[in-house]
Image (cartoon, rainbow, N blue to C red):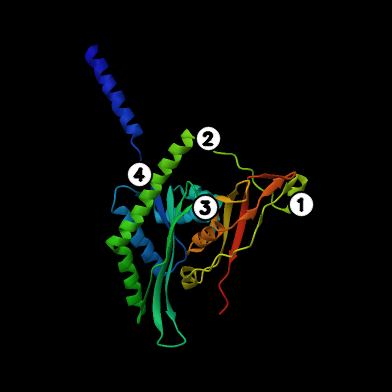
Amino acid sequence: MIPLLFLLLITVNQGLVLQTTPRPPNVGVLQFGNTRTGKLVRQRIEQALRETDSWRVIDSDLLRTAAKGAGYSGSLNMSLEEARNLGSALGCDYYIINEADTVARSPSTGDTYYEAYAVIFVVSARTGKLIKWARPAFRSSTKDSAEELLLSNLASETSRNSLLADLRNSEEDAVRSRDIASRTVPAIMEEAPSDDQLAAEQGLRLPRPFRRLLPPYPESAAQAEAQGIVDVLVDLDARGEVTQVEVARWAGFGLDQATVDTVRQLHFFPATRHGTAIPIRVLLRYNFRKPSQ
């Protein structure tokens, strides 16, 4: 009986080890559009991810079907909730949105050239946050050579390592965040009502900025002719000073960072309830449009 019991314990312990071994995170590359360049870019990104055992790449056909079933039409401007919902439908821990093409450009001066570009957004399905965005672009006198320059760049060791590092860092940040959350009780911050009338009914006077600052339209967005809405949740203390800024709707192309940097410079007349200053959380929205020529 003793040898049999010993064997049983070994079997159980081995089973426990197998059950607790973490699985590689799931990641998928979602191609937006049906261009030849977009297809080749997706294949290059998937190849880079498959070259390491640290990530499990989801089949692109399954991913595309799930995205269509969720009603996704290719938006690069999503709220955290929208991004999480899409990630849940895709069955991913992370997903990469890819939009790419090779187009002819006719400048006002100089010869016509071809530009091959790829828009790459890396998103955490768990948090809905935009981890990274990139828009590599290459010019050449012929369509094929411009496309080849782009694909060679994406296949380079530098590009592959950069992508893998971003995903790995996000995984490590997620572990640290969960650990901190398990050991601390988050402070409760009252959220401001959506308009002055609702606030007045609650005895609230909403905060007002000393002066309004508009985020600049960055060159990185101008190069992509990007437009979008950026929402930020802003925590204000009882003095009206900004204590925390979190992007709640991202647009990439440098628009999110431009917004955060600008909001951190703001100072507010504090929110009050029945005349007493209070801390509060407000939602600020910035609508970016391409500057007129």
Query: In the image, which disc is placed on residue 83?
Result: 3
Mark 3 nearby-residue class (10 Å; few <14, some 14–19, many ≥20): many
Mark 4 nearby-residue class (10 Å; few <14, some 14–19, many ≥20): few
- Going from N to C along the chain, the mark reached first, 3 or 4, is 4
Q: Nearer the viewer, residue 33 or 283?
A: 283
The residue type indicated by label 1 comes to: Gln
Q: Nearer the viewer, residue 175 or 25?
A: 175
> Real-space Cα distance between discs 2 and 3?
26 Å
Contact check, label 2 and label 3, Cβ < 8 Å: no
The residue type indicated by label 4 comes to: Pro
- Going from N to C along the chain, the mark reached first, 2 or 4, is 4
Residue that carries the numbered disc 4 in the rendered image = 24
**Circle 2 sits in a helix, a strand or a loop, which is it?**
loop
Residue 267 rendering spot, x and y as whole percentages: 60, 56
Mark 2 nearby-residue class (10 Å; few <14, some 14–19, many ≥20): few
Q: Is residue 171 left or right of residue 236?
A: left
Instruction: Name the residue rendered at 72%, 53% in the picture.
Output: 195
> Real-space Cα distance between discs 2 and 4?
30 Å
Instruction: Name the residue rendered at 52%, 52% in the picture.
Output: 83
**Circle 3 sits in a helix, a strand or a loop, which is it?**
helix
> Real-space Cα distance between discs 3 and 1?
31 Å
> Real-space Cα distance between discs 3 and 4?
21 Å
Query: In the image, which disc is placed on residue 197?
Result: 1
- Going from N to C along the chain, the mark reached first, 3 or 1, is 3
- Going from N to C along the chain, the mark reached first, 2 or 3, is 3
**Circle 1 sits in a helix, a strand or a loop, which is it?**
helix
> Real-space Cα distance between discs 4 and 1?
50 Å
Query: In the image, which disc is placed on residue 32?
Result: none
Is residue 191 placed above or below 115 in the rendered structure? Answer: above
The residue type indicated by label 2 comes to: Val
Is residue 254 placed above or below 180 in the rendered structure? Answer: below
